[in-house]
Image: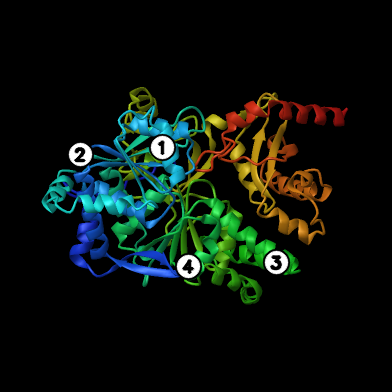
């Protein structure tokens, strides 16, 4: 199959906008729980009516401060309740929120604020305010800066006390499906980020499609979700609106490193996350087992969980012996992981990159069905997702209703439908290049099976062509190597070279525990890259990755780097994608030495 079937999109009046999702919720269940706010080690409930009142009051303040309909307002903050409050208030005022990653540099913030024409910006901390102040030279339209921690939002609300609420109603009523909802700037792995213009229709229709296609998850008894991704990321913004469309209580947590503790207190039924979160949960559990001398039993339980999950594929059932092994594994090991994630978590949606079959099967064995999906900033996040009725682990599922995929002759995935953006802000040439005859060219390579399930096979612009003419998609190898607990990042190289190699960085969070369990506590991270046991462990990860590719595509040699790829050194985008061109530019000498060393060893 090269084109998926197109299901009808939800029917919504043209006058509808994101704030109408909240108004509908208010009309039906004003006292229902809408958000949970962290408080004294627990979570305080916020009702629909309470939140709506706060949003209207802040919208009145924005109007009093001179923010006009259609104007842009930046938000630079970690994920927290106030971000969502600001988002909704800006929409009520008829304006357009523009997210900025809280880790953004001065030049990045300046570009986003300047290119979008933002007239105001809400920042979280004094440090963010300093970044914005330095960026003002290029953000010439910027008039107002408000700090969340500084208490400025309270002052904005107070300034709007005399604004007639009818002005808010009129401003929000004037916005419809076709109008601009937000401008989200792409990660920018090469060149300056492009601003993707997403409409109210993109969010409203796509979230309603998701509610219909995932109804057994969204409407399960006691449903709730916890958001810990950066709200500057399109996936997190989709989750934010999905919670309104599906009437799911939502909590915010700003620190992903503490996600396991937050899951324990919040006890969600559903989470939506990127694959790295699931890798971290697995690696942490494995590391605890190693530290407690239970490495072998954890490995056995993991293999059992994966085998049990695989036995359920295609409607089959595990045999009696495997069932007994699985019950024992669950009692001894797997239930502890289930409890660590809150004990009520039944479903998760993974997007933003490939999860991998191993983790998909492992978590299903634990009791958490991970529904892998696929999408981009330009598609308002999810184009496709696996559905509970039929999960194909290793695939990214079928299109949400109202969307359609096609595989071009060169293997590129094309998309059209309610999820696809209206174009790049101030960049008609880029828009014309990416959207041809109504089909958005994703830049990803994939294939569609006979049931309409899509598999991602690589990135079109990242295909490596070796000296022997072999085309290699690096993503499959990189994702497999990165799943090892010791590995933080993996960059496969080999363009024009005789064979494939890799640059690998160590995970500084996992490394100390691994070193301690192997009697190497005295080693620093910079010393660990030369340690034979560390090298052997990473070689094991390389060997396992190579099992899934041909000899010509396999990684023949690798180099452990003593510095990780981070946002700070500009080797990672704010959405945690490796800037391949930047790494290869700066580490050209390292790559040359890697190949020279391999040639000398062969000689």
Mark in the foreground, 1 or 3: 1
- Whole-number angstrom distance, CA of label 1 to CA of label 2: 21 Å
Mark in the foreground, 4 or 2: 2
- Which residue corresponds to mark 3? 289
Mark in the foreground, 1 or 4: 1
- Is any part of residue 442 visible from this angle? no
How many C-alpha atoms fall within 10 Å of the one at disc 2: few (<14), some, or many (≥20)? Answer: some
Residue 525: give x, y in percent of width and height.
74, 47
How many C-alpha atoms fall within 10 Å of the one at disc 1: few (<14), some, or many (≥20)? Answer: many
Q: How many marks?
A: 4
Sequence-earlier tag: 1 or 2: 2
Disc number at residue 510? none
For the C terminus, the quadrant is top right
- Whole-number angstrom distance, CA of label 1 to CA of label 3: 45 Å
How many C-alpha atoms fall within 10 Å of the one at disc 4: few (<14), some, or many (≥20)? Answer: many
Residue 388: give x, y in percent of width and height.
43, 61
- Whole-number angstrom distance, CA of label 2 to CA of label 3: 57 Å
Picture quarter containing residue 184? top left
- Is any part of residue 527 visible from this angle? yes
Give the residue at x 59% y 55%: 279
- Whole-number angstrom distance, CA of label 4 to CA of label 2: 42 Å
Mark in the foreground, 1 or 2: 1
Residue 22 vertical position relative to residue 72 in the rendered view, above or below: below
Disc number at residue 345? 4
Disc number at residue 68? 2
Q: Check contact, mark 4 vs mark 2: CB within 8 A.
A: no
Q: Nearer the viewer, residue 164 or 599?
A: 164
Q: Check contact, mark 1 vs mark 3: CB within 8 A.
A: no
Q: Check contact, mark 4 vs mark 3: CB within 8 A.
A: no
Sequence-earlier tag: 4 or 2: 2
Q: Nearer the viewer, residue 8 or 239?
A: 239
- Which residue corresponds to mark 1? 132
């Amino acid at each position: 199959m090269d084109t998926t079937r197109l299901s009808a999109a939800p029917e919504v009046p043209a006058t509808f906008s994101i704030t109408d999702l909240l108004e509908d919720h208010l009309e039906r269940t004003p006292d229902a729980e809408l958000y949970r706010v962290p408080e004294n080690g627990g979570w305080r409930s916020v009702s629909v009516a309470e939140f709506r009142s706060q949003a209207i009051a802040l919208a009145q303040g924005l109007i009093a401060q001179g923010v006009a309909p259609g104007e842009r307002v930046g938000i630079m903050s970690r994920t927290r309740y106030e971000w969502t409050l600001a988002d909704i208030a800006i929409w009520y005022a008829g304006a357009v929120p523009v997210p900025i990653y809280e880790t953004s540099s001065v030049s990045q913030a300046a570009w986003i604020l300047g290119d979008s024409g933002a007239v105001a910006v809400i920042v979280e901390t004094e440090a963010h305010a300093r970044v914005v102040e330095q960026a003002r030279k290029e953000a010439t339209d910027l008039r107002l800066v408000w700090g969340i921690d500084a208490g400025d939002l309270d002052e904005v609300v107070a300034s709007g006390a005399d604004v007639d609420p009818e002005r808010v109603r009129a401003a929000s009523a004037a916005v419809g499906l076709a109008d601009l909802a937000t401008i989200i700037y792409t990660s920018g792995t090469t060149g300056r980020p492009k601003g993707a213009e997403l409409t109210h229709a993109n969010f409203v229709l796509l979230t309603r499609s998701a509610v219909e296609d995932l109804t057994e998850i969204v409407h399960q008894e006691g449903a709730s979700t916890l958001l810990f991704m950066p709200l500057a990321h399109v996936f997190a913004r989709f989750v934010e609106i999905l919670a309104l469309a599906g009437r799911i209580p939502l909590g915010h947590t700003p620190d992903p490193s503490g996600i396991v503790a937050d899951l324990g207190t919040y006890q969600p039924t559903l989470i939506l996350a990127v694959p790295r979160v699931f890798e971290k949960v697995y690696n942490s559990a494995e590391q605890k087992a190693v530290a407690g001398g239970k490495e072998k039993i954890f490995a056995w339980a993991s293999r059992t969980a994966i085998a049990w999950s695989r036995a359920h594929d295609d409607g089959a059932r595990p045999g009696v012996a495997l069932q007994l092994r699985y019950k024992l594994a669950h009692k001894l090991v797997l239930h502890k992981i289930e409890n660590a994630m809150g004990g009520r978590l039944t479903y998760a949606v993974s997007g933003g990159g490939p999860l991998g079959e191993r983790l998909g099967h492992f978590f299903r064995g634990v009791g958490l069905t991970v529904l892998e999906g696929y999408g981009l900033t330009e598609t308002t996040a999810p184009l496709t997702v696996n559905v509970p009725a039929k999960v194909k682990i290793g695939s990214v599922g079928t299109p949400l209703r109202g969307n359609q995929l096609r595989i071009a002759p060169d293997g590129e995935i094309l998309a059209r439908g309610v999820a696809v953006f209206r174009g790049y802000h101030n960049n008609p040439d880029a828009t014309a290049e990416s959207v041809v005859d109504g089909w958005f060219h994703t830049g990803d390579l994939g294939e569609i099976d006979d049931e309409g399930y899509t598999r991602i096979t690589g990135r079109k612009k990242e295909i490596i062509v070796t000296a022997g003419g072999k085309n290699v998609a690096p993503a499959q190898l990189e994702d497999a190597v990165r799943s090892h607990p010791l590995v933080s990042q993996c960059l496969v190289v080999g363009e024009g070279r005789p064979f494939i190699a890799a640059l690998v960085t160590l995970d500084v969070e996992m490394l100390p525990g691994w070193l301690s369990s192997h009697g190497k506590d005295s080693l620093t991270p910079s010393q660990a890259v030369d340690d034979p046991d560390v090298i052997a462990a990473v070689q094991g990860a390389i060997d396992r990755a190579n099992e899934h590719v041909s000899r010509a595509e396999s990684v023949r040699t690798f180099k452990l780097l003593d510095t990780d790829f981070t946002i700070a050194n500009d080797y990672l985008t704010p959405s945690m994608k490796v800037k391949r061109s930047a790494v290869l530019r700066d580490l050209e000498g390292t790559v040359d030495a890697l190949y020279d060393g391999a040639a000398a060893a062969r000689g």
